[in-house]
Amino acid sequence: MAESKSDNAPDLTRGIPVADLEKAGKLVGKVGDAEVLLVKQGQECFAIGAHCTHYKGPLVDGLIVGDTVRCPWHHACFSLRTGERLRPPALDPEPRWRVEQTDGKIIVREKLPDFEARKPRPNEKQAWPESVVIVGGGAAGFVAAQVLRNEGYDRPITMLSADDFPPADRPNLSKDYLAGTAQEEWIPLQSEDYYRDNRIDLLLNSRVSEVDVQGKRVRLDNGREYPYGALLLATGSEPVRLNTPGFDQPHVYYLRTFDDSRKIVAATSSAKRAVVVGSSFIGLEVAASLRTRGLEVHVVAPEKIPMERIMGPEMGRFIQRLHESHGVVFHLGQTVSRVDGHTVTLSDQSSLTADIVVVGVGVKPRLELAQQAELKIDRGVLLNEYLETSAAGVFAAGDIARWPDPHSSSPIRVEHWVVAERQGQAAARNMLGRRERFDAVPFFWSQHYDISINYVGHAESWDATDIDGVFDEHDCAVTYRRGTRVLAVATIFRDLESLEAEYKMEQGVMELPRTGTA
């Protein structure tokens, strides 16, 4: 049996030489049965949990920025002083311990109380809305409700979700859960008790039919009304549905909700062959998950190279080779003409046999409520830098949000989980009058088998790419740029480099050094 990293970890309660930590900067040790990250910054030492509270990423491999640490896997950030979760995708704080320096040693002492919600000052409460209504039960809505309570907001919060399941870990629905490597109990973001204990009124199967911005109320399709002091629209997006003949059959699936994923999982128990329509992130993650379950998988897509538009031809060809090495068969430059029972006919009149068909050709933002409320819209709900819409007191976050991104110098809309969570966080704080500009660098990750691709920045178009490393060795970084300006960076197993690129973008370091003379 291989020896784990923690087997040789020092016992921090016995102390380690100061010089050892000064040399390493950070290390993992043990305090009883707990693995602890010990960090020295200047004259101060900090001890917090060694694993990210999101997916247990090893924080020792992350990036230290001031008195914070960033997770190498999915870029969550924690305070080294308090353990506080500073930004998603982590939802919970880290435990922390008291550190003492004495006689040339650093010793970790007792565990300190868990991070507690900030206690607001009385004058802050005067500007608070009397109530908050959140329309949507996804990432943005959930984090907004959580942050409101963490900021000390003690007034009514109502979440209106059209789903029949509480806020869920949506990225898992096309990845580990669909592949059969994540348990169902991992999928809810929080237990039902969480909503009760935090006085968040979560109403499922609740469809909002109207937003009255003048009267400051929302109306459900059953006629019930909810007044609000501040409103967050986080209605998300829905799969693009095709009108192809036969796509209304019961063995044709779209994937957006937990129920969608469960239905596909149930269908795989008796299925042997699957056709995935679309070579998007969702489509190819589904393909990887179904191959992990042992199904024969064919991918049909009109593109010549998968994901070329988003990640370029080199990364697209690598992703195709990766899937082909796992047995996926691609039918590129093709569309589905019709589905007759288990026969899938392609545009070149060839046919495939499929027990299940999964369609993943993209999503579209749910803008109907925003349009009904006559909010300003341009390929999304137009927001200011505080994520407020054209109507006072009405905010938006997630897939519908189009905000003035300072890194792109133009309004953008991004359909990714971490962006939605971070916008929910910012919108909640701004509902409380914090006036914090949303300037987070967009980030997402995509998982295919045991390969994870991290992407920071935003590049709708570019005129050059710089490739460092070798794709097929799973050690590579791709920089997307316009001239010398860096727009985005995609990495494979270069987690620290991804974090460093994100940090540079936050600091406005977007230009590559110019070479030659003018």
Image (tube, rainbow, N blue to C red):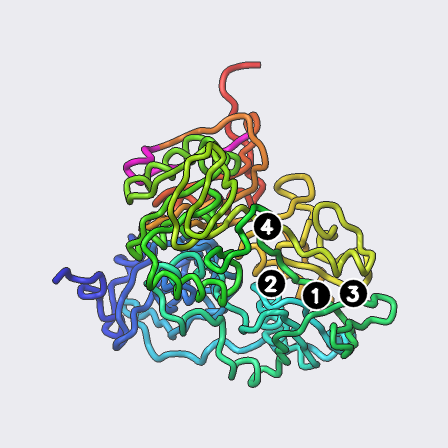
| Magenta-colored stretch includes residue 472 | yes
Q: Which residue is mark 1?
A: 232
Alpha carbons under labels 2 and 1: distance apart: 9 Å
Range of magenta residues: 469-481
Q: Which residue is mark 2?
A: 140
Q: Which residue is mark 4?
A: 240
Is 234 situated above or below 149? above
Alpha carbons under labels 1 and 3: distance apart: 9 Å
Q: Secondary structure at mark 1?
A: strand
- Mark in the foreground, 2 or 3: 2
- Point out the tag, 3 or 4, that comes first from the N-terminus: 4
Crowding at dot 3, Cα within 10 Å, few <14 / some 14-19 / many 20+, comes out as some
- Point out the tag, 2 or 4, that comes first from the N-terminus: 2
* Front residue of this view, candidates 206 and 172: 206
| Magenta-colored stretch includes residue 4 | no
Label total for image: 4
Alpha carbons under labels 2 and 4: distance apart: 21 Å
Q: Which residue is mark 3?
A: 393
Q: Quadrant of residue 208?
A: bottom right
Q: Amino acid at mark 3?
A: Gly
